[in-house]
């Protein structure tokens, strides 16, 4: 029997499995430039790491006084993002190794993301992760995005798993809060080093303050095996 028997693993996508933030930034920069905001910086973008695209463009409309509707901004940003995501998304090598390790042991896995279903599918197909990660949930499919627990609870439901037996991998504070609210343990790998001290991460079962540079597939696997309920 697998050392991980009884555990299900739910991955956040952006910044956790793949380094998609550069694509999100570029799509956002292009979208805002097209709507009359020419000076959107990476520092500006960092404020939106971990929240859904819909919430992001809703805030932009208010902050910048944009004339376009939220639906128009969302469609514009998603269109630009998908074009980038299909061709230029990098999987973190140790995350790919971890997914393959879990797959070899038959661990049920899912992706739960604030991205659109189309973006999730494009990234998983473009990176080959779709061979292992067939259960996916977009924030668009539930009532509330992170930090609400809805996406993680829906992922557990689709896997047929009890929330208490699920472990979430997350890079952003809202996602760590969502995992806690869902009653799930969390491996936290902060995308932004400045967020490592966020109170949401303090409740993580395993906090890797160094982010992806500190994450290894073997160490994460061993932690899961040791902490199995």
Image: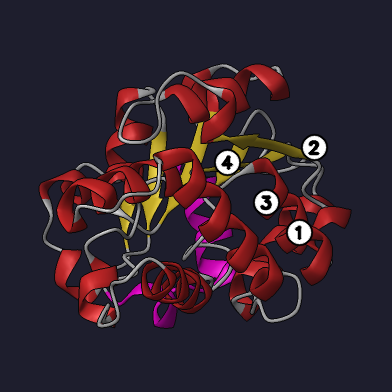
Label located before the other in sequence (4 or 1): 4
The Cα atoms of the two marked residues, 3 and 1, are separated by 6 Å
Q: Which mark is residue 120?
A: 3
Helix, strand or loop for disc 1: helix
Point out the stretch of residues depicted in magenta.
210-228
Q: Which residue is mark 4?
A: 10
Label located before the other in sequence (2 or 1): 2
- Mark 3, Cα crowd under 10 Å, few <14 / some 14-19 / many 20+, is many
The Cα atoms of the two marked residues, 2 and 1, are separated by 34 Å
The Cα atoms of the two marked residues, 3 and 4, are separated by 14 Å
Instruction: Please tell me whether residue 199 is drawn above or below residue 143 in the rendered image.
Output: below
Would you say residue 115 sits in the magenta stretch?
no
Q: Which residue is mark 1?
A: 122
Q: Return the x and y of residue 106 as percentages of the image width and height.
A: 82, 42
Helix, strand or loop for disc 4: strand
Q: Is residue 84 left or right of residue 108?
A: left
Q: Which residue is mark 2?
A: 1
Helix, strand or loop for disc 2: loop
Which is more foreground, mark 3 or mark 2? 3
- Mark 2, Cα crowd under 10 Å, few <14 / some 14-19 / many 20+, is few
Q: Are marks 3 and 1 in contact (CB under 8 Å)?
A: yes
Helix, strand or loop for disc 3: helix
């Amino acid at each position: 029997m697998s050392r991980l028997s009884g555990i299900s693993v739910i991955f956040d996508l952006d910044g956790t499995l793949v380094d998609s933030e550069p694509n999100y930034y570029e799509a956002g920069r292009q979208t805002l430039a097209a709507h009359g905001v020419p000076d959107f910086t990476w520092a500006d973008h960092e404020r939106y790491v971990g929240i859904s695209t819909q919430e992001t463009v809703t805030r932009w409309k208010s902050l910048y006084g944009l004339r376009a509707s939220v639906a128009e901004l969302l469609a514009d940003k998603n269109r630009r993002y998908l074009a980038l995501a299909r061709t230029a998304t990098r999987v973190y090598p140790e995350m790919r190794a971890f997914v393959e390790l879990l797959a070899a042991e038959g661990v049920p896995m899912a992706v739960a993301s604030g991205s659109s279903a189309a973006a999730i599918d494009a990234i998983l197909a473009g990176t080959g992760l779709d061979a292992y990660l067939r259960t996916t949930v977009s924030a668009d499919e539930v009532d509330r995005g992170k930090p609400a627990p809805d996406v993680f609870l829906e992922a557990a439901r689709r896997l047929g798993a009890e929330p208490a037996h699920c472990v979430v991998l997350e890079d952003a504070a809202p996602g760590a809060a969502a995992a806690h609210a869902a009653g799930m343990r969390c491996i936290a790998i902060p995308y932004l080093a400045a967020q490592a001290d966020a109170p949401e991460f303090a409740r993580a079962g395993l906090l890797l303050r160094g982010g992806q540079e500190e994450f290894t597939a073997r160490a994460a696997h061993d932690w899961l095996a040791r902490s199995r309920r």
